[in-house]
Image (spheres, rainbow, N blue to C red):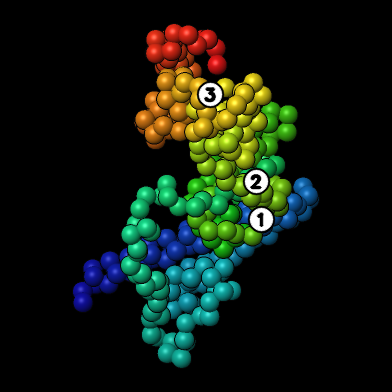
Amino acid sequence: MGGLDIIQKEIQEATRLLNVRHRVYDSFATYCDAFVVAHRMKPEEHAIAVELAEGFMKYISVSTYANTNGADYHPISLLKDPPPDRAQPHARAKVAPPRQQPKIPKSESESKSDENCLWHNYAVSGLPVKLPSARKKGDIVEASALVAREVELQTMAKPDYCRPTKIGPDPATGKMTWIISFIGPVPAFSLFGYSDKSQFLSPKPAIAYHNLGCQGYCRPSKCTRLPRCSNCGQPMLKHSGPTGYKCRRPSRCANCHHPHPADDPECLVAPPNLQVKISKEELQRIRAEGNALYLAQNPKVAKNP
């Protein structure tokens, strides 16, 4: 090996160690940020933490990393994982590759789109938009850049969706609510020690045909509309005689006002027959057509149900 090759090899090794040093700095600064935020430090305590961080980085040198036998370890990982075997001081440490999870074949139901998954949504309120930074005294960091990582640290589960509510932050307090979604349930958690405890959002009941009720397509458990006859569409309070399939009045849908029972699968406003949510103007147009058709077939019946 010539002298030029030796110099190039030394330059490459020095460059690698310098890159490791930069990664250590970024990792340590990130942990400092999380530590300061989680413990709600006072201004004087925050200054001490920043001073300790700067002192720590001051005494980090390239030789520190050389003593790790060339392995790319940073101080946090050294606390969690044992150092490499140093029985052979001149042997280069081998970094074990990440363990790969076995691939489990998905069933047909699991291979469908995420729309069929039962999401577990949590609301986390009271989180400030901006948080103090430990990298430099007086600096402010955006909470949105750290929320996903903080949720994963608190729940030991990677969130599938993290987004703030559409309402946005409260101008008076500078705090806002986040919606965190998982595929499975997780225990209650808070973010950075500032927010409130997470609240589980119960899924809304599915929209269904409300038989023995308003005869419309709604959430039956939440419906407050008057019950109607499924055949003629009249409110039960005004109805006389048998109701339902025994009703002797002309059929009139309570939804589209066309001359058919409310449970007719061909109803124009039934959700299974709609590609998108129907507008109020479109519903009025369909009902006007239904009223005209109903009166044409039943000229002796009053217009109003």
Q: Nearer the viewer, residue 251 or 136?
A: 251
Q: Is residue 104 visible?
A: yes
Disc 1, disc 2: CB below 8 Å? yes
Residue 24 at what x, y percent from top left? 51, 62
Residue at 63% in and 26% down: 236
Residue 225 shown left or right of residue 3 in the figure: right
Asked which secondary structure carries label 2, the reply is strand
Cα–Cα span, label 1 and label 2? 8 Å
Disc 2, disc 3: CB below 8 Å? no
Which residue is label 2 attached to?
A: 124
Amino acid carrying label 3: it is Gly
Residue 15 at what x, y percent from top left? 37, 62
Which residue is label 1 attached to?
A: 189
Cα–Cα span, label 2 and label 3? 44 Å
Amino acid carrying label 2: it is Val
> Which numbered circle lies on residue 233?
3
